Each structure stands twice: as C-alpha cells, then as structure tokens.
Image: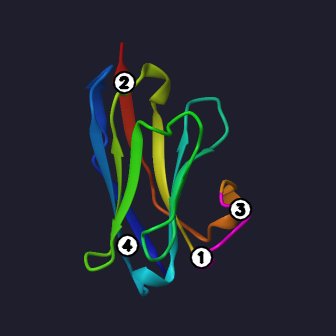
C-alpha cells in the first residue's frame, strides 16, 4: 500500500506563489511516476503535471506550463509542485497521485494513477 500526504496549500493573493509537497510512504518511491491533479468545486478533476521516475522528464497542462514546476526528491520520498504567478482560476483542491507505470500515453488521465492523497486546498484571491 502506498500512502500519499499533501501539504503546503493555503490562501494566496493573485500573482503570488506556493509550493505544495507530497510525502510518499509504503513502497519504493522511485518505482513510481508522480502526478498532480486539481479539482475545483463543481468541476472534474484535471491534470496539472507529471514527473517520471528519474525526475528528468516532466509534463504539464497548457494552463500551468511556464508557471508551475514539478520536481521530486527520491531521497526524501517527496514530490513538489512549485506554483508561481498564481491566478484565481488556479483555486482548487490539489491532489498528488502515484503510478507504477513510468511512461504512459494517458498520463493526463486520473485513471492512469493507482494511489491518491487526500488533497490540499489552494485559494487564490483576486
């Protein structure tokens, strides 16, 4: 069983920054590709970013590319999401997720991830 615990959410003004963390335990962290998703009230869960096992290859949604950076520290069993130039439309619950498949053509789909955290709330005030 893999356990994921997110932290770092909060309230921030538009244009500000936040860094989310996701601590992973239970299995070998480096065996998993990691993703971040978000879900705003009344909307479906949407893909934000993904990082493959070695931490070199990353993928982003168009809405966050250039503003968000996903990274991982395999020694600390943690994946991060650095968010800058935040906008009110970034307001959502943010979830990290783990996939045992390193390369996936459907990396943007929640169905491609086996394990999920409980989420952390991010609110961007205008």
Quick check: marks 1 and 3 in contact, CB under 8 Å? no
- Most foreground residue, 50 or 99: 50
Of helix, strand and loop, which mostly describes the magenta segment? Answer: loop
Residue receiving disc 2: 124
Marks 4/2: CA distance?
26 Å
Q: Which residues are magenta?
A: 100-107
Quick check: marks 4 and 2 in contact, CB under 8 Å? no
Quick check: marks 2 and 3 in contact, CB under 8 Å? no
- Most foreground residue, 11 or 82: 82
Marks 2/3: CA distance?
28 Å
Residue receiving disc 4: 24
- Most foreground residue, 54 or 118: 54
SS for dot 3 = helix
- Mark 4 / mark 3, whichever is N-terminal: 4
Residue receiving disc 1: 102
Report crowding for label 2: few under 14, some 14 to 19, many 20 or more residues within 10 A (C-alpha): some
Residue at (62% x, 67% y) in the render: 113
Quick check: marks 2 and 1 in contact, CB under 8 Å? no
Residue at (43% x, 20% y) in the render: 88
SS for dot 4 = strand
- Most foreground residue, 125 or 80: 80
Residue receiving disc 3: 111
């Amino acid at each position: 069983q893999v356990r994921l615990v997110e932290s770092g959410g909060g309230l921030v003004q538009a244009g500000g920054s936040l860094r989310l963390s996701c601590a992973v335990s239970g299995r070998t962290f480096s065996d998993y590709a990691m993703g971040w998703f978000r879900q705003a009230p009344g909307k479906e869960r949407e893909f934000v970013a993904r990082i493959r096992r070695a931490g070199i290859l990353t993928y982003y949604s168009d809405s966050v590319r250039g503003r968000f950076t996903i990274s991982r520290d395999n020694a600390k069993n943690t994946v991060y999401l650095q968010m800058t130039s935040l906008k009110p439309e970034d307001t959502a619950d943010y979830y990290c997720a783990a996939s045992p498949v390193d390369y996936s053509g459907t990396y943007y789909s929640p169905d491609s991830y086996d394990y999920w955290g409980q989420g952390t709330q991010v609110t961007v005030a205008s």
